[in-house]
């Protein structure tokens, strides 16, 4: 291969690298603002795959386009092309490079998953097997700053703060503090999903699922049920309030002084006819669980 050809290919590769890197940086804006450390891990992984995908896509389509435009025979040329029997070196190269990329993506994905401390279904399956550790469960080496008990039921969330004896229908957490959620469900499987945190964790019946994360951006974010849990599952939503440590402690102190009262729950109110007297949905459904008793 001529030196000029090598330099040309190298320049093209560098150009494709710059374009791919630029698009990968743009991909960070395709999601809601990252509000947790775990979100940054996911966004970095996504940007990495965008970089690789863009580089490969532009390289392959560019090669095909170049071949179609420059390597065609003339309209009335009926002669045979040069006899090519193959190239062992080329076949090894185009097999080894994709294989290497697959291992790189798999390794990076596994590393991200480990650091997110996500507990998948295999972790629950293996809980009863002595000595068998799930590859889906990351070691939780840091001591959690705040432990919050999460109860999911059809169709409501309840968040209890044991140290302050507070129960809330919204999840309040201090910014830049490690938080551990101790999650249980009273009926069917539910999924705690916070898009801004890039977190989605299944809550399996008859199991206590623990999960840790660190919020890094103050604000109010949507929390919903990612699992289809029945008729009103789309209404099983609440908010995550990320606030400063002082505001968080003040909220706990203020809320603790309030008496327990049933939380507002549209599924239960609609089902019992409190919201719309005489309203009938017209379809059978499981009776919603009573609203949780909360301080605020």
Image: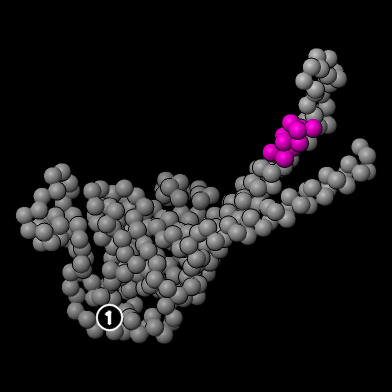
Asked if 69 appears above or below 24 in the picture, the reply is above
Viewer-side residue, 106 vs 127: 106
Q: Return the x and y of residue 209 as percentages of the image width and height.
A: 39, 57
Q: Residue 262: within the magenta?
A: no
Q: Is residue 22 left or right of residue 277?
A: right
Viewer-side residue, 49 vs 116: 49
- Where the C terminus falls, by quadrant? bottom left
Magenta part of the chain = 60-70
Q: What's the coloring here?
A: one colour
Q: Is residue 67 left or right of residue 181?
A: right
Name the quadrant containing residue 48. bottom right
Name the quadrant containing residue 150. bottom left
Asked whether residue 203 appears in the rendered view, the answer is no
- Where the N terminus falls, by quadrant? top right
Residue assigned mark 1: 255
Residue at 35% of width from left, 58% of height from top?
A: 224
Viewer-side residue, 183 vs 10: 10
Asked whether residue 241 appears in the rendered view, the answer is yes
Q: Is residue 255 left or right of residue 243?
A: left
Outermost residue, front direction?
Answer: 76
Residue at 60% of width from left, 59% of height from top?
A: 26
Asked if 70 appears above or below 181 in the picture, the reply is above
| Label 1 crowd bin: few (<14), some (14–19), many (20+), radius 10 Å | some
Q: Return the x and y of residue 10 as percentages of the image width and height.
A: 83, 48
Name the quadrant containing residue 273. bottom left
Q: Main secondary structure of the magenta part?
A: helix
């Amino acid at each position: 291969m001529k030196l000029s050809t090598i330099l040309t290919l190298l320049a093209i590769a560098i150009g494709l690298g710059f374009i791919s890197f630029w698009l990968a940086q743009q991909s960070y804006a395709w999601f809601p603002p990252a509000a947790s450390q775990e979100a940054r891990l996911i966004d970095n992984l996504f940007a990495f795959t965008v970089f690789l995908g863009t580089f490969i896509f532009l390289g392959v389509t560019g090669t095909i386009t170049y071949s179609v435009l420059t390597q065609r025979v003339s309209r009335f040329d009926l002669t045979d092309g040069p006899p090519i029997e193959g190239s062992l070196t080329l076949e090894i190269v185009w097999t080894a490079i994709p294989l290497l990329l697959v291992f790189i993506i798999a390794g990076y994905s596994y590393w991200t998953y480990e650091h997110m401390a996500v507990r998948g279904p295999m972790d629950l399956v293996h809980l009863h097997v002595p000595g068998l550790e799930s590859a889906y469960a990351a070691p939780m080496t840091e001591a959690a700053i705040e432990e919050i008990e999460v109860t999911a039921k059809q169709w409501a969330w309840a968040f209890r703060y044991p140290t302050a004896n507070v129960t809330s229908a919204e999840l309040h957490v201090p910014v830049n503090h490690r938080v551990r959620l101790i999650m249980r469900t009273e009926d069917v499987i539910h999924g705690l999903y916070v898009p801004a945190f890039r977190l989605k964790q299944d809550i399996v019946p008859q199991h206590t699922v623990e999960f840790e994360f660190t919020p890094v951006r103050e604000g109010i974010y949507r929390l919903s049920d990612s699992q289809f849990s029945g008729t009103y599952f789309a209404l099983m939503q609440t908010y995550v309030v990320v606030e400063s440590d002082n505001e968080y402690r003040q909220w706990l102190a203020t809320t603790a002084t309030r008496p327990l009262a049933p939380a507002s729950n549209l599924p239960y109110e609609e089902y019992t006819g409190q919201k719309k007297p005489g309203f009938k949905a017209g379809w059978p459904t499981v009776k919603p669980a009573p609203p949780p008793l909360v301080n605020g």
